[in-house]
């Protein structure tokens, strides 16, 4: 069956880079787009961006050049990298296969 | 960005009664292809969002037929007929017509 699981650092210091991995099973990354959505106390649910089945990406301009989404199809993994973290980036980060299947989310706290 | 505005519910809603959740978009979500680019999600306490409705009125796989979506280009309603305890949570609308995809702030449903 379709499964998605995010893994990440938990705690990140301000100005540092966040790296989260979404490991999937039950489908091929070359057949579906994968998106990243976060949920913060300040802004609620925010769409961050996605990577299409063909590998091209689309980003929320809110994150400007801070955000990068990539994948390794051989490992069934999708990656989120965001730099210059601020305390306002504290929240739960979700990966999702299109809109239908979501991971459990990973809590990220940005604090010194 | 398209702004999504959700209405509140007169909580708590008696079990077995119907509940209607409203959502308004700052721009028409009706595409020239005839489809309306609106999703509805339910986020139960402690869980990830779950897709309920897409294309404004199409139920996602496995979703109870107690849930129905309707609307025009800018005004939308999610109706839950005969609410049950498992319906408790926060409901979100989301537009996916334009980047960045945007969510409403959520509508909380409590059951009496």
Image: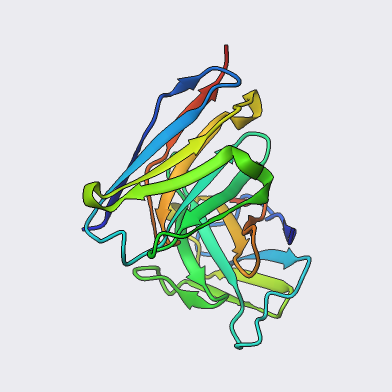
Residue drawn at (26%, 50%), measured in percent from left and top? A76
In this orientation, does residue B111 appear?
no
In this orientation, does residue B101 appear?
yes
Q: Is residue A104 left or right of residue A50?
A: left
Viewer-side residue, A90 vs B70: A90
In this view, A18 is above or below B72? above
Residue A67: where, in percent of width, then height? Answer: 55, 41
Q: Is residue A69 left or right of residue B18?
A: left
Viewer-side residue, A111 vs A103: A111
In this view, A20 is above or below A46? above
Q: Is residue A1 left or right of residue B72?
A: left
Residue B12: where, in percent of width, then height? Answer: 61, 50
Viewer-side residue, B67 vs B38: B38
Q: Quadrant of residue B50?
A: bottom left
Spot the residue most to the right: B26
Q: Quadrant of the N terminus of chain A?
A: bottom left
Residue A108: where, in percent of width, then height? Answer: 49, 28
């Amino acid at each position: 069956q379709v499964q998605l699981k995010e893994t990440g650092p938990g705690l990140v210091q301000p100005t540092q880079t966040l790296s989260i991995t979404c490991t999937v099973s039950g489908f091929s990354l070359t057949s579906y787009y994968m998106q990243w959505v976060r949920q913060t106390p300040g802004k609620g649910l925010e769409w961050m961006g996605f990577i299409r089945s063909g590998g091209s990406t689309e980003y929320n301009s809110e994150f400007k050049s801070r955000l990068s989404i990539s994948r390794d199809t051989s490992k069934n993994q999708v990656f989120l990298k965001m730099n210059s973290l601020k305390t306002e980036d504290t929240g739960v980060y979700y990966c999702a296969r299109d809109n239908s299947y979501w991971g459990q989310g990973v809590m990220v706290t940005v604090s010194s | 960005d398209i702004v999504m505005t959700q209405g509140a519910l007169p909580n708590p809603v008696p079990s077995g009664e119907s509940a209607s959740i409203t959502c308004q978009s700052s721009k028409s979500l009706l595409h020239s292809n005839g489809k309306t680019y609106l999703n509805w999600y339910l986020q139960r306490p402690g869980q990830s969002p779950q897709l309920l409705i897409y294309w404004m009125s199409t139920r996602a796989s496995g979703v109870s037929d107690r849930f129905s979506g309707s609307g025009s280009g800018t005004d939308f309603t999610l109706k839950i007929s005969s609410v049950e305890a498992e319906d408790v949570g926060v409901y979100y609308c989301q537009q996916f017509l334009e980047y960045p995809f945007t969510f409403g702030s959520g509508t909380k449903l409590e059951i009496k």
